[in-house]
Amino acid sequence: MRFRHKAAALAATLALPLAGLVGLASPAQAAGSATATFQKTSDWGSGFGGQWTVKNTGTSSLSSWTVEWDFPAGTKVTSAWDATVTNSGDHWTAKNVGWNGTLAPGASVSFGFNGSGPGSPANCKLNGGSCDGSSVPGDQAPSAPGTPTASNITDTSVKLSWTAATDDKGIKNYDVLRDGATVATVTGTTYTDNGLTKGTDYSYTVKARDTADQTGPVSGAVKVTTTGGGDGGNPNPGAEVKMGYFTNWGVYGRNYHVKNLVTSGSADKITHINYAFGNVQGGKCTIGDSYADYDKAYTADQSVDGVADTWDQPLRGNFNQLRKLKAKYPHIKILYSFGGWTWSGGFPDAVKNPAAFAKSCHDLVEDPRWADVFDGIDLDWEYPNACGLSCDETSAPNAFSSMMKAMRAEFGQDYLITAAVTADGSAGGKVDAADYGEASKYINWYNVMTYDFFGAWDKQGPTAPHSPLTSYNGIPQQGFTTADAMAKFKSKGVPATKLLIGIGFYGRGWTGVTQSAPGGTATGPAAGTYEAGIEDYKVLKNSCPSTGTVAGTAYAHCGTNWWSYDTPATIKSKMDWAEQQGLGGAFFWEFSGDTANGELVSAIDSGLK
């Protein structure tokens, strides 16, 4: 996926503020008489800026304040201002300085800090009282109950059990949460949830409430799949896959969120989502963008289910929105994709110990906070034993198959394991550089990236369609077509049903072009919204409408610009071809390039029966 390095870079520079409202109460005041707002003011990947604002909402003055919070391991304050900040391990304390300790009623004061690591503040207190404004000053909130265990799972029910929480004043009852929403309040430590849908994934957590009606932190999550659902790998056994990539950086400059899958109508028409990207570094799978992934707070109008995030919920961001999407559309399966154009450089080091790498990926994807969100893992290595953004000069041809074998051994037979792979079908090309045939024994399917064959990285042209289905007279490079790629994989022993055709929801273009037909000369890349030489379909369909087709793909000549891209009509012809070839379905890069009513997703859906 050649163009993703520019888009990924935007994630580090376009981070939006995170506002988490935290109520504060001191022992000298009634609960709710002071509040604090934590705001993540910036995020540059390896670090972030944070700010606390303390406000006196009571009727009497505050003479001093001390804010305490916990960071997860690996997150810390590196510098601070307008407060004295100290720590004991992962517990942090900020005290007012001499000039800002007194707060009259209605007054507020802020202090800021720079931090490193992926985490956000939790378990905050002011002057020893609870931070949410709902607790009794001096009364300890309950501990988290034990992670529930599931038993007696049927098509429509499951029994949950957990170990009790502790509290200094005693436990009153427990809230049972299904997919983040409370479904029952019980006094004991067991609950049977009925009325479920067969063959559906659910996530359960529990939180305790004490006799003062304070709630404690949420337990770990247990993932439950009800029986009667058939093949866990495909929601409709025997049907083709219709899968799209959702990018974590799309929530920034593109302002594209999980809810857009609902409003566009696309969620009804897909079977799978690849969430892109997690990173590969230090021989491990790691989080790609912690803020977008699980920290960004969504308001009610931005949220899939119309419910706003709260400051103290255990999971926010895209992961929580995807959880809500699955609750609304239980047929959708979600895979966590690692690597991509920018982060493929970590794979050669990781595959030196395939088993350890696979375990690290399993530990991350199946983290209890979001284990119920993901149904599979996608590995996007560009490219094993070949060159992409960088060249892999250390891996042997069997490194790729060793990695996939280790993934299958670690994740088990029921987990989806896929890979995005090269579409270079030329003699001695990238498909020939790795053992994709052997690796196919361990995967569910390959996402064959049948796009980006040609583009304005060749500044003077010749102009050529970036996603040709078949060859044509004058094609700049033999073997750079969808048909050639699929034939090459089949010759390696990959079953047709494990091959997905790829569709780009964007175009590639040149400027300084006088010739309408393909093969013209150019002076450089055409201007694009985010990167020169590339533009979303939703823009091109109006700014530079199609003037012809070549090799199953549309092209457009407008002024001195020349673009190639797929339209609903060319997608339909590609889907017909994919069915004739017996392929496993289609995937696309990526959702935000489509129109607001999802017309390209609709073309894929109607083209695959």
Image (tube, rainbow, N blue to C red):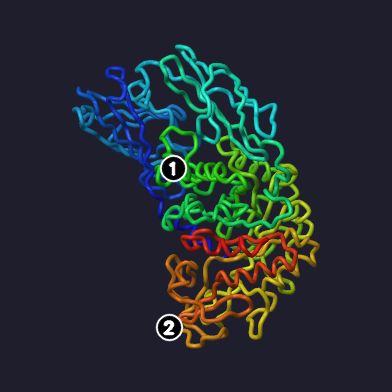
Percent coordinates x, y for residue 356 in the rendering: 69, 43
Give the numbered dot on residue 306.
Answer: 1
- Which of 437 and 12 lies nearest the eye of the viewer? 437
Percent coordinates x, y for residue 486 in the rendering: 72, 68
Q: Which residue is at 43% across, 74% downward? A: 543
Image quarter hosting the N terminus:
bottom right
- Which of 401 and 571 lies nearest the eye of the viewer? 571
Give the numbered dot on residue 9.
Answer: none
Q: Is residue 469 left or right of residue 46?
A: right
Q: Residue lying farthest bottom?
A: 515
Q: Which amino acid does label 1 sit on?
A: Gly
Percent coordinates x, y for residue 362 in the rendering: 65, 41
Does dot 1 land on a helix, a strand or a loop? loop
The residue identified by callout 2 is: 559
Q: Residue lying farthest top?
A: 169
Residue 398 vs 312, above or below: the answer is: below
Percent coordinates x, y for residue 82 in the rendering: 27, 36
Q: Which of marks 2 and 1 is in front?
A: 1
Q: Within 10 angstroms of label 2, few (less than 14), some, or many (20 or more) residues? A: few
Q: Residue lying farthest front?
A: 195
For the question of whether residue 550 can be seen, the reply is: yes
- Which of 497 and 5 lies nearest the eye of the viewer? 497
- Which of 329 and 11 lies nearest the eye of the viewer? 329
Q: Earlier in the sequence, mark 2 or mark 1?
A: 1
